[in-house]
Amino acid sequence: MAFLGFKHVKTQDVVAWYTKDHLTLRQIARLTGMTHTGIHKRLRAAGVSAQDGEWVKTDCSFCGTPIRKRRKQWHRNNKNYCNQPCYIASLENPGYKPWRQGCRLARALVSQYFRLDPGMVVHHQDGDDRNNDLSNLRVYASQVDHTSIHRGGKTEPIWDGSKIPSKPPLFP
């Protein structure tokens, strides 16, 4: 088979992947089969700067304000904020109902079904500390795992009360 010179790859597609989809040069190279340098040359010929410090236009994940982030910083974060107040506001839970005894009672209830170590955190799924129903409680291995859930992470609980069938406690 003869070498086609990558004419099957349209320059406008390369530009769109870089400017609209914000793919890196290496990602575009893997996608097309071209070299990193070849992608860089195509972008430069189209008048697009492909430097590491290139800015990406995106929207604030909380308020929707248009912002600019450096390409590497944009790739590193799944959520981007225009300022610290937006970041802090995104962490707040409007459904949170604190109660001083809620966590203590939840730990006592969960400890009847699951052995809790001192660093483990019992989490109320609906944010209401008064709702100590087993189906509302989750246990996370550490405060870091618990915090990541509040920030949109995908950490799995080490114990999930909603998966417990109605049966007597394991530890009387």
Image: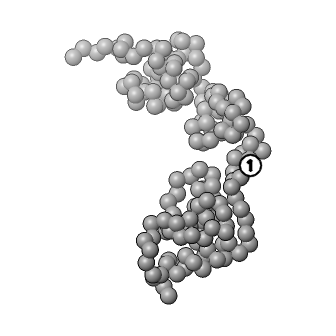
Residue closest to the eye, 124 or 146: 124
Residue drawn at x 48%, y 14% is 12
Measured as percent of width and height from the top left, residue 93 is found at 69, 53
Residue closest to the eye, 157 or 124: 124
Q: Is residue 139 visible?
A: no
Give the residue pinned by disc 1. Answer: 88
Measured as percent of width and height from the top left, residue 99 is found at 73, 69
Residue sitting at the far right: 85
Residue sitting at the far front: 166
Residue drawn at x 47%, y 81% is 169
Residue sitting at the far bottom: 172
Residue 139: name its quadrant. Answer: bottom right
Classify 74 as above or below 121: above
Residue sitting at the far left: 1
> In the rendered structure, which amino acid carries the disc numbered 1?
Ile
Classify 26 as above or below 5: below
Q: Is residue 58 left or right of residue 26?
A: right
Measured as percent of width and height from the top left, residue 51 is found at 60, 26
Residue drawn at x 48%, y 85% is 171
For the N terminus, give its image quadrant.
Answer: top left
Q: Is residue 150 visible?
A: yes
Residue 55: name its quadrant. Answer: top right
Measured as percent of width and height from the top left, residue 122 is found at 60, 69
Residue drawn at x 53%, y 24% is 18
Residue closest to the eye, 128 or 88: 128
Classify 100 as above or below 49: below
Q: Is residue 100 left or right of residue 111?
A: right
Residue closest to the eye, 15 or 64: 64
**In what element is the residue under mark 1?**
helix
Classify 19 as above or below 27: above
